[in-house]
Image (cartoon, rainbow, N blue to C red):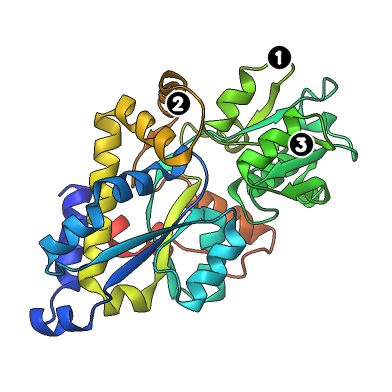
């Protein structure tokens, strides 16, 4: 049985209650978070093509609507999810792991969104490796301590100076959205480094004076890993099985469409984001070696174990399905 078939079988189990009772109690609108960059392209596709509405109707919710809310970091997303104003959070896997830990598993990831190699870049000519970073160097990233970039930087510090030094560079990090981080580093402000993401890192590396210091795949010693996931509460999944199924189906269709139509997907990203880059550049960044759109998680347990080793997580997952709902594993 394939993983997609397994997801469908699990969804069938969720939908075991009588049809009329389920449909009557379901939400009429699904709220979904997105952030900046092509890593959140599925949400742009879903919004533009009305995929929630399409799959809602196919699942028995013909009036289901969708609202896509853009956030600049993990903190506001967490607050919105716990307050109930957001149904599907999307962001760095470490933020999802922290919520899994603190809610004792009532918040889990539904699936991944992509696999991508995230790069630590600098405009400081003296910085060639992580060891060259000095106290005056400021490292911008989406969120301090809880973003994937923050954890990758901690992994790099532990690798360079020893396990006890994992937080050595934390004081030098600054939380900013990727567009602001890119502008600040290229503007030669106090920010000399940007732990970036696609397509911003590709644009930065194309400019004179910007170099790569490290990247997430080398730091972890892997060929692929999942930096971001979509996560939600167990109560929403249980109380809204049709909306849940429609959302997962919409994400899957959007992912398949992006992989089959990379040029059109790049054009849609530019239109949705207002980014002034070219279709060719965005498509090249999206399809660079190590980057792919997939709902299958990879490397999340490795990140969780590191966070448990450092005491950031109080509980250590035994296996991947401790962290993900059954449809994803």
Question: What x and y, as percent, mark residue 311?
Answer: 68, 64
Mark 1 or mark 3: whose residue is earlier in sequence = 3
Instruction: Residue under label 1, please give it.
Output: 208
CB contact under 8 Å: marks 1 and 3: no
Residue 26: image quadrant is bottom left
Between the C-alphas of marks 3 and 2, the distance is: 33 Å
Tell whether 221 sits left or right of 162. Answer: left
Question: What x and y, as percent, mark residue 99?
Answer: 53, 68
Camera-side residue of 93 and 322? 93
In the rendered image of this protein, does residue 220 appear above or below residue 283? Answer: below
| Quadrant where the image shows the C terminus | bottom left
SS for dot 3: helix
Residue 329 seen: no
In the rendered image of this protein, does residue 295 appear above or below residue 280? Answer: below
Question: What x and y, as percent, mark residue 208?
Answer: 71, 14
Count of residue discs:
3
Camera-side residue of 233 and 57? 57
Instruction: Residue under label 2, please give it.
Output: 282
Residue 160 bears which disc, if any? 3
Tell whether 23 sits left or right of 76. Answer: left
Between the C-alphas of marks 1 and 3, the distance is: 27 Å
Question: What x and y, as percent, mark residue 143?
Answer: 66, 53
Q: Residue at x 24, y 39 (%)?
A: 256
């Amino acid at each position: 049985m394939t993983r997609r078939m397994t997801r469908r079988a699990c969804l069938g189990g969720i939908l075991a209650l009588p049809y009329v009772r389920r449909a009557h109690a379901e939400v009429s609108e699904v709220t979904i978070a997105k952030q900046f960059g092509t890593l959140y392209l599925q949400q742009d596709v879903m919004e533009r093509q009305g995929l929630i509405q399409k799959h809602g109707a196919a699942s028995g919710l013909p009036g289901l609507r969708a609202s896509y809310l853009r956030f600049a970091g993990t903190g506001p997303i967490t607050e919105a999810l716990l307050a109930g104003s957001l149904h599907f959070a999307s962001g760095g896997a470490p933020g999802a792991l922290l919520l899994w830990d603190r809610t004792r598993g009532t918040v889990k990831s539904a699936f991944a969104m992509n696999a991508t190699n995230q790069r630590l870049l600098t405009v400081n000519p003296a910085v060639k490796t992580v060891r060259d970073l000095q106290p005056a160097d400021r490292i911008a990233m989406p969120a301090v301590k809880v973003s994937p970039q923050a954890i990758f930087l901690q992994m790099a510090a532990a690798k360079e100076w020893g396990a006890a030094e994992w937080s050595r560079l934390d004081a030098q990090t600054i939380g900013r959205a990727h567009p602001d981080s890119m502008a600040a580093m290229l503007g030669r402000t106090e920010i000399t480094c940007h732990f970036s993401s696609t397509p911003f890192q590709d644009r930065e590396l194309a400019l004179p004076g910007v170099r790569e210091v490290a990247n997430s795949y080398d730091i972890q010693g892997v060929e692929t890993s999942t930096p971001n996931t979509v996560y939600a509460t167990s109560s929403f999944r249980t109380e809204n099985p049709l909306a849940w199924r429609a959302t997962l189906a919409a994400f899957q269709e959007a992912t398949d469409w992006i992989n089959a139509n990379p040029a059109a997907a790049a054009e849609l990203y530019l239109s949705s984001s207002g980014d002034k880059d070219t279709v060719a550049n965005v498509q090249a960044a999206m399809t660079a070696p190590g980057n792919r759109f997939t709902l299958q998680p990879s490397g999340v347990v490795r990140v969780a174990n590191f966070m448990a080793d450092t005491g950031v997580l109080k509980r250590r997952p035994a296996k991947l399905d401790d962290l993900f709902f059954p449809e994803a594993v």
